[in-house]
Image (tube, coloured by chain):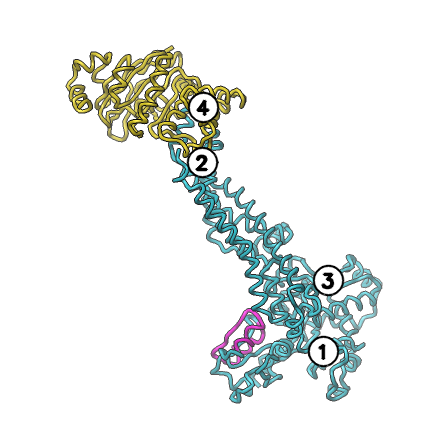
Amino acid sequence: MEEESSYRWVLASVVLLLGPAGTVWAEPVGGSEREAVRARLAQGVLRWGGDAEGGAPYQLRDPQDPARVIGFEVELADALAQTVSRQWDLPLRAEFVQYEWVSLAAGLDKGDFDVILSGYEITPERAHTFRFTRPYYVYRQHLTVRQDDERIRSLADCLDKPVGTLAGSAAEELLQKAGVRDIVAFDGQVEPYLELVLGRVDAVLLDGPIATYYGRQRGLKTVDRKIGKGFYGIALRNDDVVLAAALDRALSHLMIEGTLRRIYRRWHIWNEDQAELAHGPKDREELAGLGFDATGKPATADEPPPDDAVDIDILAASAREWTFDHYGPLLLQAAGMTVFLTVTSMALAMALGLVIAMLRLYAPPPVNWLALAYVEFFRGVPLLLILFFLYFGLSSYGIGMPALVTAIVGFGLNYAAYEAEIYRSSILAVPEGQWEAGRALGMSDTTIFRRIVLPQALRTALAPMTNDFVALFKDTSLVSVIAVRELTKEYLILARSSLKFVELGILTALLYLIMSVPLGYLSRYLERRWSPERQGS
Amino acid sequence: MHVTVTNLTKRFGTKTILDGVSLEVHPGETVVLLGPSGSGKSTLLRCLNGLTPFDGGEIRIGEHILRPGHNGNGESIRQLRRWFGMVFQDFQLFPHLTALENITEAPIRVLGLTVSEARRRAMTLLERVGLADRAQAYPRQLSGGQKQRVAIARALAMEPRGLLCDEITSALDPELKSEVLAVLEDLRNDGMALLVVTHEMGFARRAADRVLMLADGRIVEEGPPARLFAEPSSPRTRQFLSKVLT
C-alpha cells in the first residue's frame, strides 16, 4: 500500500538508530558505566520539555486543579525517573519544563531541559540532529468525519475534499504524499475538529491519541484508525549517550513489568500496534509485559478499561468543573507576568531610545549613522526573530541569558528603535528660539538641552510613548516562543485542556482591556494636557 | 568698557544683509535702530549676541574680539553675552517653567547662584516689572505683555550692562505695548544701555540718545532723535519716516 511504503523509511531509520543504543542492554553493567550515569544525573533531576498546549492525552491541565499538569507523558516521565533511580541507585525525579512546541528543538539544544517528551515523532531529519531513545509509543493516524457523512470511509475518498490537520505534523506530510489536494493545516489540535463540526472541512486526519480525545465531540465519528504508522521517541542532545542508554534500559524495564501498558490503558491509548515496541535481546519479556503472546497477538481479547482509567471525556470534565476560582488565579498570575514584562521592557526602551536619539541628532559621523542603522535594523526585523536570536542564537556563542532577561532585552532593544524616533521628532519639535533664548542667557548647549529642550520634548513624547506601551502589552504574547509564560500562552493552555475557548477568551480579553484601556485614556489626557499648542512660550 | 562694531558684514548666500556696519554702544546709552523690513536690523542684533555668525569685520568688547567664523561659543561670545542680554519679539519663555523659574534658571546654571539667592533676585526683578504676584504662573497663563516683561526680567537677572531688544512690542496689542515700553524707559533712566529695534516712533523720540537709520545693510544716517526726525538728511530716512509717521 502507498501509505505503508511511505513509512518504510521511518522504520528503517528507527532500526538504524536503535543499533548502537541496543548494544548497551546486552552488556553487563560495568562499574565505569555506573559512574557515568551517576555523574550525568548528579543534579537529581530529569528535566523534560513539553508543551501543555498540546493537550490531552499528552500533557494537559488537571480537571481537578488547573495549576497541575497531567497526561500519559507526565506519568511516563515519572515512571522513567523512578526506574532509572532504582536501576542505578541514585536520587532522581522528573521535572516538567513548559515550552513552546515550535521551540522544543532549540530549547533542547540550548540545555533548558534534558529531553523532549512531547509526542515527538521520530523522523529522519530529527534523527540526524538528535539522539532518540527507542520508541515509547506506536501511533497511527485516525480519520474522523461527521456522523452523517457516508461518503468518506478511507483516505482515498478525501482526495478532492478539504481535510483538516495540524500544521507541521506527520499527518500533514502523509496527506501531501497521499495526494489530498485541499489540506487545511491549523496551529492547534482543537481547531480542525471545530471546523469539521462546522462543515468547513469534510475530514480530519490526526494522530490516534489526539483523535481519541478531541475527535469525540458530538456529531463526529472516526472511520479509519489504521492509516500510516509512526513512532514517538524521547529526543536527547546528540552527545548525551549515557542518558539515552539509561532511558532505553528504563523503557525496556517499564515494558517488561507492565507499567507502560498500564499507563496507556489508563489513558485509553493502548492497542495491538504497541507489540512493535518490543525489540532487542529482551523482546520476548517486553512483548509479554506489553500484553501480547509470543506471536504478537493480544494476550486477552477485549479487555475492559482498568478501574483507575481516566475519564475519556476529560476535556468535557474540565469544562464542567473549572470555574473562575480555578483558572482566575492562573490567568491573573500570567497577567502579572505580562505587566512586569511590559513595564521593565518599556523602561529599558525609553532609556536606550533617548541615547540613540541623541546620538542620531548630535553625534558626529559615523556614530550618528550607526544610530540610524540601529533604528532601521530594529524597525525592520521581526521581533520574533530577535527573540529567537537572543535566546537560542547567542547561547551557541556562550552568551546565555535567562528567558525572562532575554525577553526584556529583546523587547527593550526593539522598542528602543521606535522610542528613539519619537524622542527625535519631539526634540526637533522644540522651537529653535528656545535654544537661542538659552544661548542668549549664556547657557551652554548641554545645559539648554538638559534643562530646556529635553523637558519639553518629553512632554510631547509622552502621549505617543503611552501608545507604544499599549502596543507592547499585546506584543509581549510573543515571548512564549522562548518559554516565558504570560497571559496569552496561559489562555491557550487552559483553553486546549478544557475547550472553554469562549469563556476563557472573554476573561483574558477583559484582563488585557483592564490593563490597556486606562493607558489609552492616559495617553489622550497627556496629549491634551501637554500639546505644543497649549504650551505657549 | 563699551562695545565697538567695526565694518560688520553678513551674507546669506549671495544676498548681503549687513554691508559694513560700524557702531559703538556705550554704557548707559539708549540707541534706537530704525529701518524698513529687510534692512538688516534683526540680523545686526543677533550678530551682537553671537546667535548669528558674520562674514567680515569684528566686534570688540574690552580686550575681547569676536571675529568672523566663530563657532557660537568661546570666551568672546561669553563676554558679549554677559555685556548684552537679549529680548525677542516672540518672548521665547520656557513653557515648562513658571515665571520665577524662567528667571532663576540661568543665574543658577550659569552664574552659580544658590536657589535662594536666585529667587531673591528674581522676585526683585518681578516687582520691578510689576509682576510679583505672577511669580508662580506658567507662560501660557500670562498675557503677551506680561510674558515680555518676564522675558525682560529674565535677561536682567544675568546683570548685563545692556539689553538687545528685537521688536519686542511687535507681537503685542497696542494697550499692552505701553506697559512693556514703560519698563524699557524705566531701565534707561536707571542707566541700562539699550539697543532697540522698534517701530515705536514715540518711544524713539522720548527715550533714544541716538537713532541709527539702517537701509540695505548700511547705516545711512545717525543722530539725536530731535534732529533726525525734524530734518532727516538722507532720502532713505525721509522716505522711511514719511511712511511710518502718517
Chain with colour yellow in the figure: B
Q: Which residues are magenta?
A: A169-195
Q: Against B225, is A230 above or below?
A: below
- Mark 3 vs mark 4, CA separation in Å: 72 Å
- Mark 1 vs mark 4, CA separation in Å: 94 Å
Q: Nearer the viewer, mark 4 or mark 2?
A: 4
Q: Residue at x 47, y 51 (%)?
A: A379
Q: Secondary structure at mark 1?
A: helix
Q: Position of residue B202 (x, y in %)?
A: 25, 19
- Mark 1 vs mark 3, CA separation in Å: 25 Å
Mark 4 burial class by Cα count in 10 Å: few <14, some 14-19, many 20+: some
Q: Which of the 4 quarters of the picture holds residue A83? A: bottom right
Q: Which of the 4 quarters of the picture holds residue A478? A: bottom right
Upstream in the sequence, badge 1 or badge 3?
A: 3
Disc ID at residue A277: 1
Mark 2 burial class by Cα count in 10 Å: few <14, some 14-19, many 20+: few
Q: Amino acid at mark 2?
A: Tyr
Q: Secondary structure at mark 4?
A: helix
Upstream in the sequence, badge 2 or badge 3?
A: 3
Q: Position of residue B225 (x, y in %)?
A: 23, 14
Q: Nearer the viewer, mark 3 or mark 4?
A: 4
